[in-house]
Amino acid sequence: MNAHHSISRRAALTGGLAAGFLLAFHLPLRAAVNEPVQPRDTTDGKFAPNAFIRIDETGHTVLIMPQVEMGQGTYTSISAVLAEELDADWSKVEVQHAPPDDKLYGNPTFGLQVTGNSNSIRAWWLPLRKAGATARAMLVQAAAAEWGVDPASCTAAKGEVAHAASGRRLAYGTLALAAQAQTPPKDAALKDPRDFVLIGQPLKRLDTPDKVNGKAIYGIDAILPGMKFATVAACPVFGGKVGKVDDRAAVKLPGVRKVVVLEDMVAVIGDHMWAAKKGLEALEIEWDEGPNAEITTKDVWDDLRKASRKDGAVAKSDGDIAKALAGGDKFEAVYELPFLAHASMEPINATVHVKPDSCEIWTGTQIMTRVQSEAAKAAGLPIDKVIVNNHLLGGGFGRKLEPDMVVAAVKIAKQVDYPVKVVWTREEDIQHDVYRPVYRDEITASLVDGKVAGWKYKVAGSAVLARWLPPAFQKGIDIDAIDAAVDAPYDFANFHVEYVRAEPLSVPTGFWRGVGPNNNVFAVECAMDELARKAGKDPIAFRKSMLTKNPRMLAVLDQVAEKSGWGQPLPPRVGRGVCVQPSFASFIATVVEAEIDDIGEITLRRITSVVDTGIAVNPDTVKAQIEGGLIFGLTAALYGEITIDKGRVQQSNFHDYRMMRINETPKIEVIVVKSGEAPGGIGEAGVNAGPPALRNAIYAATGVALRRLPIDRKLLAAGKKA
């Protein structure tokens, strides 16, 4: 009943966009009437100078989005970049998802149509500006030809071309067909940033109104006539298979349509989710648990620690590290981070309709073309017979960089002749995730005259890239695993970084928001605080003494010290901790102020973050992403850990895989530095800032140097007593 009510509410609200919206935002609402939700791109009768811009004779402008929207504000920022150089009328622009096509929409960094690594704006900044500028130049050329004047005497603004000398104007819609016949210039002039009218402004998010009023459709919302629902149970042990299934009780339940047994999971299809869920609960399943049924968290850590004793592949080496470490005041420390689940608000799901000669998919994914190709394999169809309709994502965090949920849904849907929406319960989602790897970081350093003279860093952990993008794994180096380790911001004359690939027994690992830097920033910044204390220096002063070659980092550190009240007196058991990071080509300094009580419980009092991300396309989005990232990362620091016993993940839902609650969230102040540098990444940077800054605040307040996450409150309580 609730599902039907929600659908009718949305249907009632989709009669048209309310007057006054700044930008029309196309959403795949047609799934409710059995039409393809992905708009079929057509250039008939339109000005289509490239893969990203479509203008028809009415002036209606469609911008095709190469990156997906999962709450990070990408659609708004990409639209602003395109519309800026196009000089489009912002009120006449519509946004559409791009179809799967690596050649047209492949991320310039990866060559794949993928959204991740905080690089949507970084990667597309110049290509999209050039696309917009080229289209604008062709429209100007068309107007100049119509008037018989020099194109240089014409200007464009708000969807019109003007000729100031004669006072004539032509709208883009009027020029659309004529512009299509123009020869694109080889190097259309880009705007001087001083002339930007959209970029740099706090534009309202385009997706927010529909998310508030109920029009927004996520993958889990797609509804098709005749569609049935399915939910699944996979073998609880990593690598296990299905043994025997007794479905006699399940098939008798009202609404249960079919039981589907695959190699490693069982699905029940029902008329609605409740029927599917109750049917699954009624099954009697014997699992073939396989060789991993005795693996524990201890086994994983023992294996990783053993692997880390080996010499690693050298990722970077400057100076004479052996000589540097032979003298001075020596420091050694090990930092360890646990498995983490993604736990997106929208559980993983996919709706699939497999026919004898085609397969159509409705989902939310960060990697459309890989979903298409893997679905084609599962369906046994040519890739051009598979249609992928991408929706808004209710959180991705790296989990939806994997196609496994779609592959499973295709295998299930092959067993029936109607569309099937497959939804994983929260428990199945958390217990069959692709987890953030466990990491172990060894740091050996030497201090001479109050500065780091030698720095040796070894990171051991899973090589996600070796599986996910094999060409990126070269000479034993996973470039993600060493990110923010090889480019630590400090002036270390003698500097050595190694990487040891150590896959965690049978546990599947993947990208998690913040990726490699969330491990390395933590270890580097925690060690810097311990080294500062060893040198008898203030943590910020210590860092500043080794940032003389990094003026952007030095500037944000100076500003965060001022804005956070660094150095001002604090009550007992209250501390401030700092973190600086060069993650994703952004420069960020963060101070966390926290209080620790006698039993080790932590109260976050205040967070201040100063961000130099180059040109901030939308400053409001930058602030929101830093705020959200800080909360995401601090949640992991305070509570996040996936543990394993007998080959099984022990956590199952938000009662034992906790999220930070609203009453635990402190005041957060984010200051965005005005900059003329190229944009950096921002969506994941806040995640990396929170944990080390909090840990360093705890260190300042208690003297306890925590070296593992999540935070051990018993250790803090014991430290207080000691």
Image (cartoon, grey):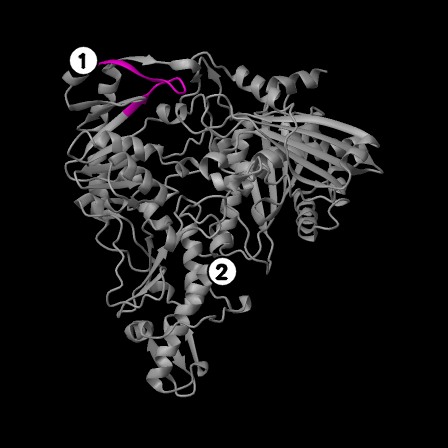
Looking at numbered disc 2 in the image, what kind of residue is underneath it?
Leu
Look at the image and tell me whether residue 95 can be seen. Answer: yes
Question: Which residue is label 2 attached to?
Answer: 126
Q: Earlier in the sequence, mark 2 or mark 1?
A: 2
The answer to whether residue 443 is left or right of residue 146 is right
Q: Compared with residue 172, is residue 15 higher up or lower down, i.e. above or below? A: above
Q: Compared with residue 613, is residue 361 higher up or lower down, i.e. above or below? A: above
Whole-Å distance between the Cαs marked 2 and 1? 60 Å
The answer to whether residue 384 is left or right of residue 401 is left
- Which class describes the residues within 10 Å of circle 2: few (<14), some (14-19), or many (20+)? some
Question: Which residue is label 1 attached to?
Answer: 249
Q: Position of residue 281 (x, y in %)?
A: 26, 17
Residue placed most toward the observer, 256 or 24: 256
The answer to whether residue 77 is left or right of residue 443 is left
Residue placed most toward the observer, 345 or 702: 345
User: Which residue is rendered at x = 79% and y = 30% of the image?
Assistant: 534
Q: Quadrant of the C terminus?
A: top right
Does the segment drawn in magenta span residue 304? no
Look at the image and tell me whether residue 570 can be seen. Answer: no
Would you say the residues marked 2 and 1 are in contact, meaning their CB atoms lie under 8 Å apart?
no
Query: Considering the numbered disc 2 on the image, is that residue within a helix, a strand or a loop?
Result: helix
Residue placed most toward the observer, 271 or 110: 110
Report the span colored magenta: 232-249
Q: Position of residue 569 (x, y in %)?
A: 73, 36
Residue placed most toward the observer, 667 or 629: 629
Count of residue discs: 2
